[in-house]
Amino acid sequence: MKKKILFTLVIAMLFSPMSAFAAAPNTLDAAGNEPSFSDETTVIPYFTVIGSLAYALTFSGGKANCSIEVNVSQSKADKVAFQVTLYKKVGLGWQSVTSWDKTVSVSSSSLARFSQSASVSSGNTYRLAFSATVYKSSTVVETINYTTPEQSN
């Protein structure tokens, strides 16, 4: 008898949370509609050392000017290693134009800046793909990887 009661209690406990979730109503917005997600939904990762990141890909005089700036917590970082590739759109794919590897010290204003230029031909579409790896005393503390949207020159 005790086994039967114990078995019944275990089964009841197992199914109780499931029935609560199954009966829970859908979350609705202010208009009473179910929320939807679009291609414009932004997910922002949480970083503990990298405070912000800015980039620019501009074109002038037959050159692509590539700039990246990383703002870091100076007490947690002393250098940033940039690996940057400039890509040109070819058909449905992307072809590497040039790549750079550059390590820079974090400035007293907590910034690490990368800036390079490359010759490009007009009338094409380009993008940057890069990683910025943050170091403190030669130890990797954080890395961010990013590919910019395509831009035409």
Image: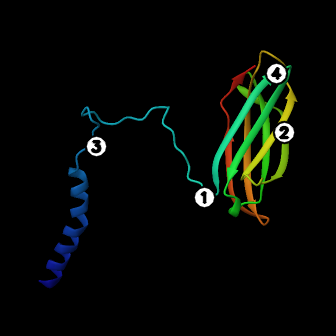
Q: Distance from label 1 to label 2 (Cα)?
A: 28 Å
Helix, strand or loop at label 1? It is loop
Kindly identify the amino acid type of the residue bearing the numbered disc 1. Answer: Thr
Kindly identify the amino acid type of the residue bearing the numbered disc 2. Answer: Ser
Helix, strand or loop at label 3? It is loop
The residue that label 3 is drawn on is: 27
The residue that label 4 is drawn on is: 60
Report whether 12 appears left or right of 150: left
Report whether 77 appears left or right of 52: right
Helix, strand or loop at label 2? It is strand
Which of 102 and 24 lies nearest the eye of the viewer?
Answer: 102
| Residue 83 image offset from top left, x and y in percent | 79, 46
Mark 3 or mark 1, which is nearer to you?
1
| Dots 4, 3 in contact, CB < 8 A | no
Disc assigned to residue 48: 1
Kindly identify the amino acid type of the residue bearing the numbered disc 3. Answer: Thr
Q: Compare marks 4 and 3 and give the one earlier in the sequence.
A: 3
The answer to which image quadrant residue 115 occupies is top right
Q: Residue furthest front?
A: 108
The residue that label 2 is drawn on is: 99
Which of 135 and 27 lies nearest the eye of the viewer?
Answer: 135
Q: Distance from label 2 to label 3 (Cα)?
A: 47 Å
Q: Compare marks 3 and 1 and give the one earlier in the sequence.
A: 3
| Residue 92 image offset from top left, x and y in percent | 70, 24
- Name the residue located 25 percent from the left edge and 62 percent from the top edge: 17
| Dots 2, 3 in contact, CB < 8 A | no
The answer to which image quadrant residue 134 occupies is bottom right
Q: Distance from label 3 to label 1 (Cα)?
A: 31 Å
Q: Distance from label 1 to label 4 (Cα)?
A: 36 Å
Q: Residues within 10 Å of mark 4 (few under 14, many from 20)?
A: few
| Residue 116 image offset from top left, x and y in percent | 84, 36
